[in-house]
Image: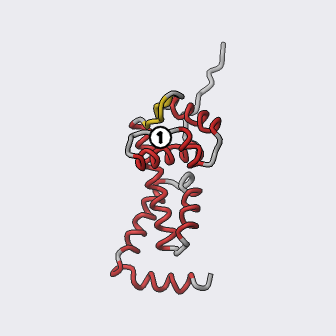
Amino acid sequence: MGTMVEEKPFELTASLEDYLEAIKELIDADGHGHAHTSEIARRLKVKMPSVTNALGVLRRHGYLNYDSNYPVTLTEKGVAAAERIIGRHRVLKAFLQEVLQLPAEAASATACRVEHVIDDQLIVRLNALNAVFADETCSAAIRQRLTQMLQHI
């Protein structure tokens, strides 16, 4: 007569998304197809026990290959998740920097915080708005008006 407890599906936390993003960026930067735990710790400004704990969680859920004796590699699932996160960051940063005219560093820091909570529909819409602002002929009047309004903020 035991009760069945329905287990919630695993969802990446903001912290775990940051790990995937950092690992993908490190892998892309070094060209060797892997990242070292010490590099991950440095990139995220965390201690090694935090890295090994997060990597263990990500490994158990199929996002990466990790053994303490070898560098970290991403699985297909891990690459897809990391690329999705990085793409969200790029869209948000472009919107904040190009449309809302925030300085690059502030735009990147804000994008880093927001990328974890914004839904896909809004990302697609922000990306469309970014495209309008990138097209000088379509957005000249809008860009000028927005610049005027932002000067008063």
Residue at position x 57%, y 53% from top?
A: 117
**Residue 134 position within the rendered picture, expressed as x and y whole percent measured from the top left:** 38, 73
Work out whether residue 59 or residue 14 is closer to the camera in this orientation and state it.
59
Type of the residue with mark 1: Ala
| The C terminus: image quadrant | bottom right
Residue at position x 59%, y 38% from top?
A: 51
Residue at position x 62%, y 48% from top?
A: 45
**Residue 102 position within the rendered picture, expressed as x and y whole percent measured from the top left:** 55, 72
Vertical placement of 42 versus 109: above or below? above
Q: Mark 1 points at which residue?
A: 35
Q: In which quarter of the image is residue 78?
A: top left
Q: Is residue 99 in view from this perspective?
A: yes
| The N terminus: image quadrant | top right
Residue farthest top in this picture: 1
Mark 1 surroundings within 10 Å by alpha-carbon count, few (fewer than 14), some (14 through 19), many (20 or more): many
- Element type at mark 1: loop
